Amino acid sequence: MARVVGLLVLCVACLQSAQAFLGGGAAAVAGARSSSAQQASALRMGPIEVHFTVSDKKITAEGGTLLSQVAAKAGVKVRYNCKAGTCATCVLNVDGRMQKACVTKLDPFTRRVVKIKK
């Protein structure tokens, strides 16, 4: 028990000295985080090109749009049953990954072109 307490005291002392040593390091880290947040929001800007390969239809859509809405806008028919994501009738192959069209949204951090196969 005494060893555990000694280790905890040592860890707290190490953290305090590291914090004192870094000083303004926390502000630099916060600045880096805000910079990466700005870069992430820039990635979300602009449309995503969606290519339905079976019907060879291309459409642009914003990140966060349901795949079912994108398909409907492109005039691509998708089979549905429950429209809640439980039956998997609406599964589409999105860039090699099977996704449920009724509940899956376009990822705003994705690359700018998405290929969908039925």
Image (cartoon, helix red, strand yellow):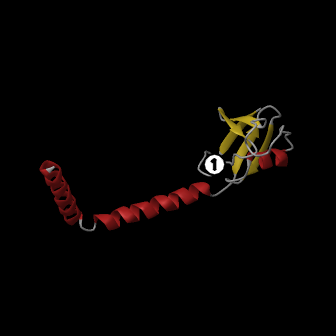
**Position of residue 22 measured from the top left corner of the image (x, y, whole percent):** 23, 63
| Image x and y of residue 15, in percent | 22, 59
Give the side of residue 6 with respect to residue 115, left or right.
left
**Residue in the foreground of this view, choosing between 39 and 13:** 13
- Is 83 or 24 nearer to us in this picture? 83
Q: How many marks?
A: 1
Q: Quadrant of the C terminus?
A: top right
Please rate how many residues cluster around mark 1, counting C-alpha atoms within 10 Å: few if below 14, some from 14 to 19, many from 20.
some
Above-or-below relation of 118 to 1: above
Residue nearest the viewer, comparing 20 with 86: 86
- Can you give x and y, in whole percent of width and height, for residue 62 in the image? 70, 54
Residue 43 position in % (x across, y down): 58, 54
State the image quarter where residue 45 is shown: bottom right
- Give SS at disc 1: loop
Q: Is residue 60 left or right of residue 108?
A: right
Q: Residue, x 66% and y 56% (percent of image)? A: 46
* On screen, residue 47 above or below 90: below
Residue 61 located left or right of residue 1: right
Kind of residue at badge 1: Asp
Task: Give the labeled residue for mark 1.
Answer: 107
Q: Residue at x 84, y 46 (%)?
A: 72
Residue at 51% x, 62% y is 38
Left or right, 74 with respect to 17, comes to right
**In the image, residue 26 above or below residue 5:** below
